[in-house]
Image (cartoon, rainbow, N blue to C red):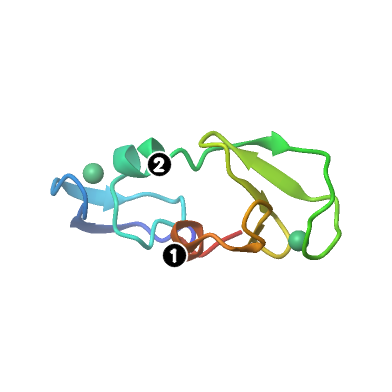
Amino acid sequence: MKGDYRNGICNKCGEETIYGNDGNEIGLCDKCFDNLGYQQIGYTGEDCVSCGRNRVIKFKNGKKLCEKCNIDQKTNDYDPIWMETGGF
Ligand SMILES: [Zn+2]
Ligand SMILES: [Zn+2]
């Protein structure tokens, strides 16, 4: 759940951490989550391949996901990592 701060152990680096507010349900510290490249860069201006709405967000890691239906524009399916964070 977004905005849910809590203590935990990062699943990747094992550091004790406070999970951030990035919807970080996959149990990574902010640093490891950032390393996955799920920082939003902005709208692509393209229509979503699934729902047709002009709400596709580009991420730093190159992924393009629809803000409305969460569908990955490349695979036409949900991005498992992003969905584990709770999606948009
Ligand atoms: Zn970590
Ligand atoms: Zn969509």
> Circle 2 is placed at which residue position?
36
Q: Residue drawn at (70%, 55%), measured in percent from left and top?
A: 67
Amino acid beneath label 1: Glu
Q: Residue drawn at (35%, 57%), measured in percent from left and top?
A: 5
Name the secondary structure under disc 1: helix
User: Is ligand 1 less than 8 Å from the beta carbon at label 2?
Assistant: no
Identify the image quadrant of residue 68: bottom right
Q: Where residue 3 appears, x then y in whole percent?
A: 47, 57
Q: Where residue 47 appears, x then y in whole percent?
A: 84, 50
Ligand 2 found in image quarter: bottom right
Alpha carbons under labels 2 and 1: distance apart:
13 Å
Compare marks 2 and 1 and give the one earlier in the sequence: 2
Q: Is residue 85 left or right of residue 55?
A: left
Is 78 situated above or below 73? below
Q: Where residue 63 appears, x then y in whole percent?
A: 58, 44
Q: Is residue 74 left or right of residue 25?
A: right
Image quarter where the C terminus lies is bottom right
Amino acid beneath label 2: Leu
Q: Residue drawn at (81%, 65%), measured in percent from left and top?
A: 51
Is 61 situated above or below 81? above
Identify the image quadrant of residue 87: bottom right
Q: Residue drawn at (28%, 46%), measured in percent from left and top?
A: 29
Identify the image quadrant of residue 81: bottom left
Residue neighbourhood size for the residue with mark 2, other residues' Cα within 10 Å, grouped as few (<14), some (14–19), many (≥20): few
> Circle 1 is placed at which residue position?
84
